[in-house]
């Protein structure tokens, strides 16, 4: 992913609300499955890591990206933005 594409995705993510929250139990198989499902439906998602989660959000983002075969767009504080390109017929976001 180029820096221009990453910047475009960041601009799209700015207006989004987080659709998932990761809490005290950190990453569970259920969390990973719901992230994968959300990525299939939306391509770009924002995740909120709650205060009571002791894990580092950057590590959580890397693990989620690896497990869901997606890309980390950005991690700011406790917010994670992930992107996974959709299938050709369902593609919603067209990168510059």
Image (cartoon, helix red, strand yellow):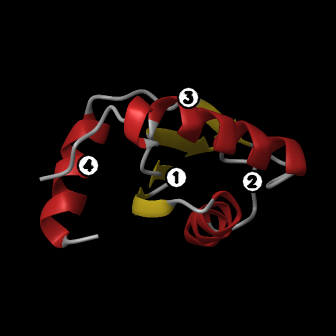
Reading the chain from its start, which is encountered first: label 4 or label 1?
A: 4
Asked if the residue at tag 3 contacts the one at tag 4, i.e. Cβ–Cβ closer than 8 Å, the answer is no
Residue 79: give x, y in percent of width and height.
Answer: 48, 49
Q: Which residue is drawn at 26% across and 49% down?
A: 9
Q: Nearer the viewer, mark 3 or mark 2?
A: 3
Residue 42: give x, y in percent of width and height.
Answer: 47, 31
Q: Nearer the viewer, mark 4 or mark 3?
A: 4
> In the rendering, which numbered label is found on residue 53?
2
- Element at badge 1? loop
Asked if the residue at tag 1 contacts the one at tag 4, i.e. Cβ–Cβ closer than 8 Å, the answer is no
> In the rendering, which numbered label is found on residue 25?
none
Q: Which quarter of the figure has residue 63? A: bottom right
Reading the chain from its start, which is encountered first: label 2 or label 4?
A: 4
Q: Which residue is drawn at 53% across and 59% down?
A: 70
Q: Cα distance, mark 3 to mark 2?
A: 17 Å
Asked if the residue at tag 4 contacts the one at tag 2, i.e. Cβ–Cβ closer than 8 Å, the answer is no
Q: Cα distance, mark 2 to mark 4?
A: 26 Å
Q: Cα distance, mark 1 to mark 2?
A: 10 Å
Residue 41: give x, y in percent of width and height.
Answer: 54, 29
Q: Which of 76 and 95 is in front in this view?
A: 95
């Amino acid at each position: 992913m180029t820096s221009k594409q990453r910047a475009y995705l960041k601009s799209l993510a700015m207006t989004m609300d987080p659709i998932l929250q990761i809490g005290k139990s950190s990453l569970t198989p259920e969390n990973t499955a719901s992230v994968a499902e959300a990525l299939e439906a939306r391509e770009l998602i924002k995740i909120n890591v709650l205060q009571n989660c002791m894990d580092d959000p950057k590590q959580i983002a890397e693990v989620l990206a690896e497990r869901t075969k997606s890309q980390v767009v950005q991690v700011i504080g406790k917010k994670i933005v992930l992107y996974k390109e959709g299938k050709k017929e369902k593609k919603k976001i067209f990168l510059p």
